[in-house]
Structures are given as C-alpha cells and as structure tokens.
Image: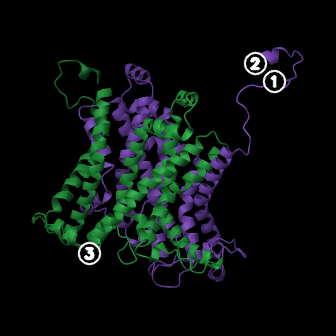
Chain colours: A purple, B green
C-alpha cells in the first residue's frame, strides 16, 4: 500500500525515497551475522583445504615438499608431476601412467551411462504408464535390492559373467554398472513420468499410439531435464566406482580409480607425493568438472534420488 | 491392445505385452541378481566352500569360525565405532550447516557448492588426499611442530588406537555436504507460518529448532539415516585408499574382510558368511523403515 501511494503521489516519475517499509534493515556486523557467516566460513575452509593442498602439492618439486609444509604455496611452479602422473607413473610392470586408466574409464563410463539410462528410462516409463500385474512387486524388489551390500551379490555375478564369457572384460563391467545403477535410476524416471500429466498419455493412446511410439515421440522429448540429471548422477557414480572395477576387470583394463590406488599405495619405489597428488587430481577432475558445470542440476539429482520424489 | 482390454478375454499373459517385454531387464535384475544372488550367497554361507563353491553343508560352522576370528571382531568394532560417530556427526553437522544456510544468507550458492563438491569425488580420491594431509612426516603434524609446538602428535593413520577416527575425518569431509543438502531441502519444506507463530509466541530460535522444527522434519531425518547407514555398512574404498586396513588389521572393515576372503584367501565360505552378516546388519535397519514407508504408502493410496 505504502509503495503504491508514494509512486502515485509522485507524478514527475522520478522515484523519491519511500517512507520506512518492510523489515528493518539488518546491521551488517550484528552478532547474529558474525556467528552465521563465521561458522559457515570456517566450515567452508575445512571443505576447501584438501583441494587446495592437492593443487599446491601437485605443483611443487619433491625437494620443496621435503623441506616445506604442505600448506605453503609453491615457490617454483612445475608441471612435471602432472606430466609424470599422466604418462609415466608405474603400476606393476606398466609404466605408461594414468592415461591408460583414463581411457579405460572413458570406455567403461560412456556405454554404461547410456545403457543404464536407456534401460532405466524404459523401466520407469513402463512402471508409470503401463503397469502390469506384478510390476510393483518387481519394482519393490529392485528398490530393496539397492540397500543390499554389494558384497552379497558379487560372487554370484562373477559366476554368471564367467558362464557367459564376459568375466574380466569391459563388457562385463558395463553390464554390472547397468545392473547396479538400475534401482535409483528407475526410481528417478518413474517418479518423473508419474508427475507428467496423464492426459497427454491418454490422448496419445486414443490417437492409436503404442508403447514405443508414446515413449519416443512424447515421453522422451518431454523429459530432457531428467535425462540430464540422471546422466550427471551416473557419470560421477560410475567414474568413481572402485569395487566393481577391482573385482570385474583385469590389470590391463583397470579403471582410473583402481589404477590410481595402485600407483599411490604401491610399496616399492620412492614415494613421489607431488606425482601422487597430480594423479589424484586427474582422477577427480572428471566428476569435479561435471559437478561444477552442472551446478544446481547435480543437487536436484541427489535430492530426487535420495528423498523419494 | 484395445481388443485385449475388453472384459471376458482371459488371455492375461499377452495383455500389455510391450510393457512386459520392455521390463525384462528389470525383472531379470530384480529376480535373478538381487533376489537370486542374495539367496545363493546366504545358502552357500552354510557350506564349507573354499576355492570353489561346493554344496556340502556344515551348518553354522562358518559363522562360528567367523566370530572366532579376531580380524572379523576388529572389523565389526571398527564398523560400530565408525558408524555411530559418523551418524551422529554427519547428522549434527549437516543439520547445523543447513540451519545456517537457511538464514537467508548471501552467497548461498557459493557455500553450497563448496560444501557439496567433495561428494562428487570418489572415496579413493578422498582417502588419498586425507592420507597425505594426515601424513605425520609432512602433513598437519609436521606443520604444527614447525610452528614451535614440537611435542604435538597427530598421526591417526599410524596409530592403531585412533586410526578409525582418521578415516571418520575423511568420510565426514566427503559426505556431510549431502546431509546438509537433504536437511536444507527439509527445512525449506517447512511452512513459513510456523516460524511466524513461534516468533509471535516469543520462543527463542534454538528452542524452535529443537522442539518444533526437528520433530517436524522426522521423515527427512529417517530417510537421511537410512541413506547414511547403508553407506556406512558398505564402506570399503575409503579404507583401502587411506590405510589399506592398516596399521596391521586395525582399520579393517567387514566389506574389506569379505573381499579379501573371497578373492585372496580362497576361503569362499568365510566370505559368504561375512557378507551374510553384513546383509543381516542392513536388514535390521532397513526392514522397520521399509515397513513404515511402504505400509504408510498403502494407507495413503
């Protein structure tokens, strides 16, 4: 009210300072603000320090690391550790660096993400729009299965993969990732498709569209955001996996995380901490880039996957 | 399709056929892998399989041997300590951070980005970074010592009594951002009028949080609890990367025990028994929750 009054009372159009209205402006340095921002800043430091230490260490030479402390910025910046981590670091007999693990991880992650999203989106669509007798039971088993420790199911899967001849290959690992990504992804897609207006689906049915036609022509174009969210989740999840990588692949097809662990925690040789940190950063780079680029979508993804709906 | 929906057609199997065909991967995963695999492992945990799975039943022998193994007892103790502390701290820290973020602050996005980025990193990366920071020769300990406090000791990863706290430190760094995000979503879901009413009644802010807001956020707390717990039982990569279970066996966890017995010690029976114990632990937590959750859903819908 006060606002409209001041504006109408000022026919010249220039905005004069309106009278006091709304909440009293807070003082910048109130005790409350100091506590809130102080605590948040301290917490932020705890979260940021490891990243800082990683970057700083990876840019130092070994002599400087031995002398100085881990928090001091590098006196002389060198990119040699990065080159070494990428191209020369040794695991066992191989000395071709993390690059091999990187390409293995790419070869694992890309098909796994595509396959698991394809399967999960169709699952979610069937569960949301084409329920059949028993579909909810299978879905419940799937969701409960998400909580079963992987260790319980690993050995039977090893046997199954050995029987069909995929044990130790990248295809086997891709299959395993698609299987274990299914519960959360299916839940994500199901909840999304349920939230779409049912009239759309019904109208398409009346027009004579079938299962796949509705999926490709109506559901897919409408659900791009959820595909992006799910892609973000799966990419970081599969890239970061360690357990399945170590169980289902052989040394020459190890994903990046497994190779990184072998490089850093190998017992022989002189420990080169700068190379180790460069390697660690290289491995963390992909999910970090995905995270920083995707921003709010990442948050939305974990919230949707975690808090049902 | 339409013909099948008419009443009087008994052919149930072909009804909705496309949907059933499309769901085959899901059905196979649910039934064969999740259900079948679990039953298989539990069944074989009652056998004396060593190098290869064999169906010669020995009753509860494997479980007795399991609980007689000091390494298993250590790993269970570790899991209990780590689990309890991790739950308490991540819920507390997560909630406090969320409550602070909910004060209509500036730079909310920046803070959120900072708190959550470790969650995007793998446990391997997390473990290796904290291994480096906690390195007594170069890390925090040496830095504090070089500042003049020469007797300062902080080497959790090399002291078997406190190694699990070193792992906890790293785990909290990685996971509290997620808890904060979930809690923040919960806080945002609370009606603004509740706050106004509390303010009108002159209830101090901390009391409003403790006695009104937290009880209202019970579902969020339960979901978070279930999520964190199932993550805790699985903890494996972090320990492998940070300490490899050392010094000695002092930071061993059940998941690592299972893996080592299945793939290195060639003692499958022990591995199956240990993994069945993990399953039991999860079941004790999940079943009551699932009962509440799904029971509630039925009543609603």
Which residue matches tag 3?
B265
Q: Quadrant of residue B267?
A: bottom left
Q: Secondary structure at mark 3?
A: loop
Q: Position of residue B24 (x, y in %)?
A: 28, 42
Residue at mark 2 to residue at mark 3: CA–CA distance: 79 Å
Quarter location, residue B54: bottom left
* Residue A198 pos. (x, y %): 41, 23
Q: Which residue is mark 1?
A: A18
Alpha carbon of mark 3 to alpha carbon of mark 1: how far? 79 Å
Chain containing mark 3: B
Q: Is residue B127 left or right of residue B141?
A: left
Residue drawn at (31%, 32%), measured in percent from left and top?
B296
> Which is more toward the observer, B20 or B194?
B194
Quarter placement of the N terminus of chain B: top left
Residue bearing mark 2 = A2
Q: Residues within 10 Å of mark 3 (few under 14, many from 20)?
A: some
Q: Earlier in the sequence, mark 2 or mark 1?
A: 2
Asked if badges 2 and 3 are on one and the same chain, I answer: no
The alpha-carbon separation of the residues under discs 2 and 1 comes to: 8 Å
Residue A174 showing in the rendered view: no
Tell me the chain of label 1. Answer: A
Task: State how many labels appear.
Answer: 3
Q: Position of residue B298 (x, y in %)?
A: 29, 30
The residue that appears at 14% across and 69% down in the rendered structure is B48
Which of the 4 image quadrants contains residue B216?
A: top left
* Parent chain of label 2: A
Q: Residue furthest front?
A: B202
Dot in front, 2 or 3: 2
Split into 4 quadrants, where in the image is the C terminus of chain B? top left
The residue sitting at 41% across, 39% down in the picture is B218
Instruction: State yes or no: discs 2 and 1 in contact (Cβ < 8 Å).
Output: yes
Dot 1: element: loop
């Amino acid at each position: 009210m006060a606002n409209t009054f001041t504006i109408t009372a000022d026919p010249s159009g220039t905005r004069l300072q309106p009278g006091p209205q709304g909440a009293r402006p807070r003082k910048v340095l109130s005790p409350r603000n100091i506590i809130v921002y102080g605590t948040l800043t301290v917490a932020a430091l705890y979260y940021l320090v490891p990243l800082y230490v990683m970057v700083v260490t990876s840019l130092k030479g070994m002599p400087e690391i031995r002398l100085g402390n881990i928090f001091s910025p590098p006196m002389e910046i060198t990119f040699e550790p990065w080159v070494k981590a990428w191209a020369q670091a040794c695991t066992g007999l191989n000395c071709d660096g993390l690059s091999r693990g990187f390409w293995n991880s790419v070869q694992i992650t890309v098909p796994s993400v595509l396959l698991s999203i394809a399967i999960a989106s169709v699952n979610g669509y069937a569960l949301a729009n084409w329920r059949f007798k028993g579909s909810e039971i299978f879905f419940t088993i799937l969701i409960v299965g998400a909580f079963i420790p992987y260790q319980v199911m690993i050995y039977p899967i090893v046997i199954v993969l050995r029987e069909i001849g995929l044990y130790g290959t990248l295809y086997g690992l891709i299959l395993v990732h698609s299987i274990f990504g299914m519960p959360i992804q299916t839940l994500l897609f199901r909840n999304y498709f349920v939230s779409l207006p049912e009239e759309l689906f019904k109208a398409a049915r009346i027009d004579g569209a079938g299962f796949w036609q509705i999926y490709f022509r109506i559901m897919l174009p409408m659900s791009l955001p959820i595909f992006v969210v799910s892609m973000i989740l799966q990419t970081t999840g599969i890239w970061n996996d360690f357990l399945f990588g170590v169980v289902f692949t052989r040394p020459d097809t190890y994903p990046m995380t497994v190779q990184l662990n072998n490089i850093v925690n190998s017992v022989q040789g002189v420990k080169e901490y700068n190379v180790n940190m460069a390697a660690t950063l290289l491995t963390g780079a992909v999910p970090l880039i995905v995270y920083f680029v995707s921003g709010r979508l990442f948050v939305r993804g974990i919230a949707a996957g975690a808090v049902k709906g | 399709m339409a013909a099948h929906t008419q009443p009087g057609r008994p052919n149930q199997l072909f009804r909705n056929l496309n949907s059933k065909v499309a769901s085959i991967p899901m059905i196979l995963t649910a039934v064969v892998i999740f259900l079948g695999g679990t039953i298989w492992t539990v069944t074989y945990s009652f056998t004396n399989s060593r190098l290869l799975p064999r169906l010669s039943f020995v009753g509860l022998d494997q479980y007795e041997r399991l609980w007689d193994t000091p390494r298993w007892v250590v790993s269970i103790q570790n899991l209990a300590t780590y689990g309890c502390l991790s739950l308490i701290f991540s819920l507390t820290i997560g909630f406090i951070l969320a409550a602070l973020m909910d004060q209509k602050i500036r730079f909310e996005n920046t803070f959120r980005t900072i708190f959550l980025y470790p969650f995007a990193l793998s446990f391997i990366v997390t473990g290796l970074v904290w291994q480096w920071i906690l390195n007594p020769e170069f890390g925090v300990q040496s830095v504090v010592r070089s500042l003049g406090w020469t007797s300062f000791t902080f080497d959790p990863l090399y002291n078997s009594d406190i190694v699990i706290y070193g792992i906890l430190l790293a785990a909290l760094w990685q996971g509290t951002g997620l808890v904060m995000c979930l809690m923040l979503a919960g806080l945002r879901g609370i009606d603004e009028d509740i706050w106004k009413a509390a303010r009108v009644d002159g209830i101090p802010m901390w009391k409003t949080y403790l006695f009104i807001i937290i009880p209202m956020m019970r579902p969020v707390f339960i979901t978070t609890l279930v999520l964190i717990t199932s993550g805790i039982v699985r903890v494996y990569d972090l320990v492998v990367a940070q300490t490899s279970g050392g010094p000695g066996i002092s930071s061993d966890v059940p998941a690592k025990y299972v893996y080592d017995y299945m793939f290195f010690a060639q003692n499958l029976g022990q591995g199956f028994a240990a993994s069945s114990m993990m399953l039991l632990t999860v079941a004790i937590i999940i079943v009551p929750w699932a009962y509440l959750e799904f029971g509630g859903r039925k009543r609603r819908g």
